Image (cartoon, helix red, strand yellow):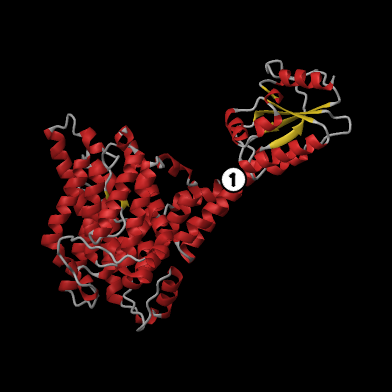
Amino acid sequence: MKNLKPMLFTTLKGYSKEQFIKDIVAGIIVAIIALPLSIALALASGVSPEKGIYTAIIAGFVISFLGGSTVQISGPTAAFATIVAGVVAKNGLDGLAVATVMAGIILVLMGIFKFGKLIKFIPYPIATGFTAGIAVTILIGQLKDFFGVTYAQGVSPIETTEKLAAFFESIGTFNWAAMLVGLVSLAVLIVWPMIPKVQVIPASLIAVIVGILMVQFLPLSVNTIGDLYTISNKLPAFQMPNVSFDLVKTVLPDAFTIAVLAAIESLLSCVVADSMTNTRHRSNMELVAQGAGNIASALFGGIPATGAIARTAANIKNGGRTPISGIVHAIVLLLILVVLMPYASLIPMPTIAAILFIVAYNMCQWRPFVKLVKTAPKSDIAILVLTFVFTVVFDLVVAIGVGLVVACLLLIKRLSGSASVDSWKYIDDENDPDSINLRKVSKQIKVYEVSGPLFFGVAEKLAQIESEDETKCIILRMRSVPSLDITAMNELESLYEKCKEKGIILILSHVNEQPMKVMKKAGFTDKIGADNFCSHIDEAITHAEKIVK
């Protein structure tokens, strides 16, 4: 049960006034960082600006309160932008809410059933590929606003390729004033962090202020958030989505994608945080918290949330060491929502696009991508490129599915190469107590060395076992078989039946624990007889020689 205990209750033991002050300061700074990002990510996700704030408030509070990390900051992230935009375009806000609630339930179940450690089995090329793909989709999605392009009436592209095609078709409507605001905002975002002693003020906030001043005081015709969206500073309110069985079926794949992505992102953020604070997170509790946070976010008008690496790092760098800083961050955002949200209507759309360009650049992982292409085996490069291309051309659901299928097939191929069924080989190793060097075995006894996991990908290798007319016993030496699945078990039973027809006795030597459990459950041990299971090769040979005589 310790692994399902929120970290908040652990850190409050011995909590000091000094740390409380540091947590408050860190929470305020992170809230200022989260404000423009939450608005920008909401717009990139195809929803109104305040929904990004709702997510940071509701999910941020719940996940910090229940989370398995001491410093995790959660909220809307760029990883979900393309998924959310696709769900909203196809199934509306009700579809998004249902998908997010379902994803939350999946995450809670993953935590309860201790799936926290299983996330590490997502191959690195897949994670790198879809992260880079998401970055490209975000960048393409913001070209329209950055250059002030206007689409023709009725043109509302959803897929990334459609957005790119629509952008080039409408390039004639390019607005130089929008590009000027975008370029200045982009320059601020790049240069500001390089200036010493001012990093405490987020570059995105400065870019927003500069963008607003340019549009308000210069003769520039540029769209602002208020020109395209209705801004609300209402408090988050409970909203029960309209649920139907057809809608659940439709958004189920998206729910699984959101859940898997939330798990990967949040646990990755926890690992980064652990390395910065020399602590250890509780992965299963974090999954439960992420699930609860996403359910709450969806029911109060928000969008999917997960751990945000950049905001978590900012929390740590500014002194946050307990979940109190995450709770403070949510409360400060709530106050900002009520007081300052109406002013968000003044933010120029090219500034939002510039912020998302930087977000895309920071998450694209181009250095690891290039390194993989240069150094990884061809099979891993294929997985990387496939996942990247499918993310950009199709969507994340297809990309992750294809990536995992290809990775599994390649894994099966590799494992099948490691498994072997060979007739007895004589070795010369005095240090090996099981060495069979110079042993004499009757020609009526055939010994096969079986190595590697026996599963469906290699089960047919058991069919390679041959007998001769004079063979009376076949010994399978299985000391190097760690596991056995039902397909291989079925092949083993077929081998037994063939031996039985020819009057050959099948003997198994040194069967490990997991294969033995499978054999017992399948009734194979009763069929072959307990006497024909030997713990050591010497015992098996002696037993076979008695049968032959």
238 left or right, relative to 283: left
In the picture, residue 453 is in which quadrant? top right
- Is 40 positioned to the left or the right of 132 in the image? left
- The reply to whether residue 134 is visible in this rendering is yes
Who's the residue at 24% across and 62% down the image? 301
Q: Nearer the viewer, residue 475 or 59?
A: 475
Q: Is residue 280 among what the camera can see?
A: no
Q: Is residue 116 above or below residue 294?
A: above
**Element type at marker 1?**
helix
The answer to whether 401 is drawn above or below residue 309 in the figure is below
Residue 463: where, in percent of width, then height?
75, 41
Residue 194 percent coordinates (x, y): 27, 51
At label 1, the amino acid type is Leu
Q: Which quarter of the picture shows residue 540? A: top right
Q: How many marks?
A: 1
- Residue furthest to the right in view is 469
Residue 77, position as x, y percentages in the image: 32, 55
Q: Residues within 10 Å of mark 1 (few under 14, many from 20)?
A: some
Task: Report which residue position mark 1 lands on.
Answer: 411
Rendered position, 516 above or below 381:
above
Q: Nearer the viewer, residue 73 or 479?
A: 479
